[in-house]
Image (spheres, rainbow, N blue to C red):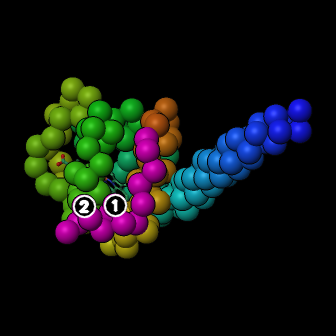
Amino acid sequence: MFNNIFRRNAFAIPALSGLILLSSFLLNRHTELEESIKRGKQVYITNCISCHMEDGTGMQGTFPPLAQSDYLMADTHRAIKLIKEGIDGEMTVNGVTYYGFMPAQDLDEKQIADVMNYIRNSWGNKGEMVKAEDVKAALK
Ligand code: HEC
């Protein structure tokens, strides 16, 4: 009897602590993303809103949308690079071709990660968290 309880607990304790560790890890990741999105919104308001608009819909034919943009969501590295370096030329976003010019944005790695998290998690978009290290790697 005693032996039996001991054996069960011997399994339950590591299993339980594993579960607690996992859930605190997941919760932590969640709040980390939320915090980044909050900062990213401020970066967006200061740097992007004048062209891509508050609701991320841009201006058809001139400024491409970020809201539900296939171009943005398809390639994180490409989006990071164009935010930092600007872009000039032809691109097709949600079936519409743009021949526009976006000026380079004077933002650091953390600000780019934050604004990426904001635009990739707003207006119906849903994306994995982007970290400053990812931005650094993409800009290498
Ligand atoms: C002066 C206007 C302007 C500003 C400011 C601007 N953009 Fe853009 N953006 C553009 C234009 C124009 C294009 C399309 C360029 C082309 O046609 O080659 C574009 C393209 C993009 C794209 C890729 C296409 C898409 O819709 O998915 C992303 C992502 C993007 N911008 C994000 C941003 C972010 C983030 C900021 C702020 C940090 C920003 N832009 C600031 C004008 C602007």
From the viewer's perspective, tell me whether residue 63 is left or right of residue 20: left
Residue sitting farthest toward the top:
95
Q: Is residue 16 visible?
A: no
Circle 1/circle 2 CB separation < 8 Å:
yes
Whether residue 77 is situated above or below residue 95 in the rendered picture = below
Residue 133 against residue 71 in the figure, above or below = below
Q: Which residue is mark 2?
A: 138
- Please give the residue where the numbered disc 1 appears in the rendered image: 134
Q: Residue at x 42, y 60 (%)?
A: 131
- Cα separation, mark 1 vs mark 2, equals 6 Å
Q: Is residue 72 visible?
A: yes
Residue at the (27%, 38%) spot, across then down: 74
Please identify the quarter of the rendering in which residue 108 is found: bottom left
Magenta stretch: give its range.
127-140
Which kind of residue does numbered mark 1 sit on?
Asp
Foreground residue among 73 and 89: 73
Q: Categorize mark 2 by other alpha carbons within 10 Å: few (<14), some (14-19), many (20+).
A: some
SS for tag 2? helix
Q: Nearer the viewer, residue 51 or 36?
A: 36
Split into 4 quadrants, where in the image is the N terminus? Answer: top right
Q: Residues within 10 Å of mark 1 (few under 14, many from 20)?
A: some
Could you tell me residue 41's position as x and y percent?
53, 56
Residue 89 belongs to magenta span: no
Tag on residue 100? Answer: none
Identify which amino acid the numbered label 2 is placed on: Ala
Residue at horizontal 36 percent and vertical 66 percent from the top: 133
Q: Position of residue 107 (x, y in %)?
A: 37, 71
Single out the residue that lies furthest toward the left: 89
